[in-house]
């Protein structure tokens, strides 16, 4: 079993919507599912550097984490994924070529989400952080 350490971003705009990216169809795990921007940590990279790099790669945004929010775990037969999530507020438009889309909590509840990210949104809702 592979152990993966990842970093992701909860990016919220002034309309209280969250930025999600569509995972490519060729992904082995959760193809064509929506997820928070993020990805695997590289050797000698900090969690903060990972989330900054991954957000830029996936959304074209220059990201500066506001605060570390939480971590999640997803365990399958093939891997154990530990993901650290950072919070960020965004007040501008995103690059038109990005594959990311802003979604409200109501819209997110009807999406096919990757990993166990529905638990992150349930937690945010319970704490009334953004909704």
Image (spheres, rainbow, N blue to C red):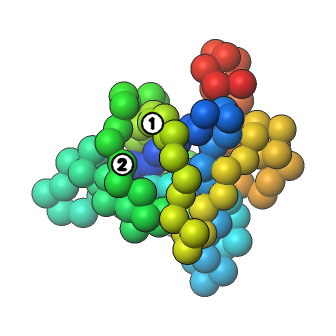
| Residue 18 appears anywhere in the view | yes
Q: Which mark is residue 63?
A: 2
Q: Which residue, as the protein is rendered here, is positioned at the far front?
A: 92
- Residue to which mark 1 is pinned: 88
CB atoms at circles 1 and 2 under 8 Å apart? yes
> Image quadrant of residue 43?
bottom left
In the rendered structure, the answer to whether residue 52 lies left or right of residue 109 reads left
> In the structure shown, which secondary structural element does the residue marked by tag 1 occupy?
strand
In the rendered structure, the answer to whether residue 88 lies left or right of residue 106 reads left
> Percent from the top left, x then y, of residue 63?
36, 48
> Percent from the top left, x then y, of residue 46?
20, 48
Q: Is residue 86 above or below residue 45?
A: above
Which corner quadrant holds the C terminus? top right
Q: Which residue, as the protein is rendered here, is positioned at the far top?
A: 127
> Percent from the top left, x then y, of residue 39?
42, 60
> Percent from the top left, x then y, of residue 34?
67, 59
């Amino acid at each position: 079993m592979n152990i993966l350490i990842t970093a992701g971003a909860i990016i919220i705009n002034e309309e209280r919507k969250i930025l999600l990216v569509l995972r490519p169809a060729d992904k082995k795990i959760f193809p064509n599912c929506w997820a928070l921007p993020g990805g695997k940590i590289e050797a000698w990279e900090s969690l903060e550097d990972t989330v900054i790099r991954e957000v830029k790669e996936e959304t074209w945004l220059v990201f500066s984490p506001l605060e570390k929010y939480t971590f999640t775990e997803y365990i399958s037969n093939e891997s154990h994924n530990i993901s650290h999530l950072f919070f960020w507020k965004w007040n501008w438009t995103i690059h038109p070529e990005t594959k990311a889309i802003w979604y409200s909590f109501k819209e997110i509840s009807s999406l096919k989400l990757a990993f166990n990210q529905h638990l992150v949104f349930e937690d945010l809702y319970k704490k009334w952080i953004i909704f």
